Image (cartoon, rainbow, N blue to C red):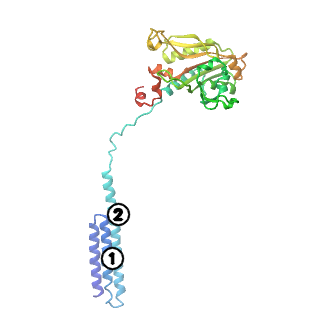
Amino acid sequence: MDVASFSAQLEELQARAVTSIAAADSPESLDVIQTAVLGRKGELKGLLGGIGPLPAEDRPKVGALANPVRSAIEEALAERRIGLEAEALHARLVAEAEDVTLPGRPLGRGSLHPLRETEREIARRFSQFGFVVVDSPEVETDELNFDALNIPGDHPSRDLWDTMWVRDPDAQTRDDKLLLRTHTSPGQIRVMRDSEPPIRVLTPGRCYRYEAVDASHGFEFFQTEGLMVDEGTSMAHLRGLLDAFAHAMFGANRATRFRPGYYPFTEPSVAFDIGCVVCEGEGCPACKQSGWMTILGSGMVHPLVLRNGGIDPERYQGFAFGMGVDRIAMLRYAITDIRAFLADDIRFLERL
């Protein structure tokens, strides 16, 4: 066999390999062709193994003819692999295609909890009169929760609250007597000690008491309390402010009244009533046939409380008021069971 014969066989091998490569329909088929043609025991290796009988000067010529053949086959393999990958990607894209013109799945839209919404609405109404919201801690000292508010340890008014203590209530020092606040009034003491009159603040937040849980009571509830301290502050200012609030929340024609009450931190103290939102004053079980509903307690800040807050009661006067956010929300949304607010029932929230 001479060089010309080897050249013809190499050309025939290249043509056959390129044809097989073009017809391959998977990467696995290309691997088989590559092994059969270019492998250690492949056709090209076998063909070159037959150059032994050639004269020594012809053997390099056959090697020179074989190198372009190997390169052409390797190039054909590489191009076909790229082509197969492109075809596979196209097929996958077609299979996974999404019609972007179709409407998407609707997502549920969240909203404020009715208690939070009511709390913000209360703050918004009073902000029109210059009141600002001040946060205060839920864990309070015995001194701020009781003593500074004219509720000493032996005062009978302490019987109104069964307190959740965080630390021993019999501790010797005030700072060691920690509790979950029973109202947000301690925040007012903090404000008076940290600020100079005039003062107009709201102290909203979560409160805790030992309560038998029923439709109208809970051991965890929300309050918003207000405080105004300035020279010449009077009950007339308090009445005008609360009337404006009630009319904004429950209608401009809503009847209101002051009724004598008792709170150890105010003197005089009054309960603030509005005409029943259920029967419009006619009398019903909701208002116990009275035609009135109490929505908050209020009064002029006791001089001792002002003094405990670092304010001179001879120069300044103040009034305070406090309301249950839960109570206001129940009236706004016509809810009869306070437990529904914290029941984590999405169906209840969706109805509001």
Q: Classify mark 2: helix, strand or loop.
A: helix
Q: Could you tell me if residue 13 is visible in this image?
A: yes
Instruction: Work out which residue is located at the far bottom of the displayed protein and give it.
Output: 55
For disc 1, the neighbor class at 10 Å (few under 14, some 14 to 19, many from 20) is many
Q: Classify mark 1: helix, strand or loop.
A: helix
Residue position marked by numbered label 1 in the rendering? 69
Q: Which sits in the foreground, 299 or 213?
A: 213
> Total marks drawn?
2
Task: Kindly identify the residue that appears in the image at 28 percent across and 73 percent down.
Answer: 17
Q: In terms of image quadrants, where is residue 82?
A: bottom left
Which residue type carries mark 2? Ile
What percent of the width, then of the height, locates residue 54? 32, 89
Which residue type carries mark 1? Val
Q: Is residue 120 above or below residue 102?
A: above
Q: Is residue 241 left or right of residue 15?
A: right
What percent of the width, then of the height, locates residue 203? 59, 25
Q: Is residue 298 left or right of residue 105?
A: right
Q: Which sits in the foreground, 243 or 58?
A: 243
Residue position marked by numbered label 2 in the rendering? 82
Image quadrant occupied by the N terminus? bottom left
Q: Is residue 234 left or right of residue 12?
A: right
What percent of the width, then of the height, locates residue 24? 28, 66
Q: In terms of image quadrants, where is residue 13?
A: bottom left
Residue 218: assigned label: none
What percent of the width, then of the height, locates residue 132? 60, 25
For disc 2, the neighbor class at 10 Å (few under 14, some 14 to 19, many from 20) is few
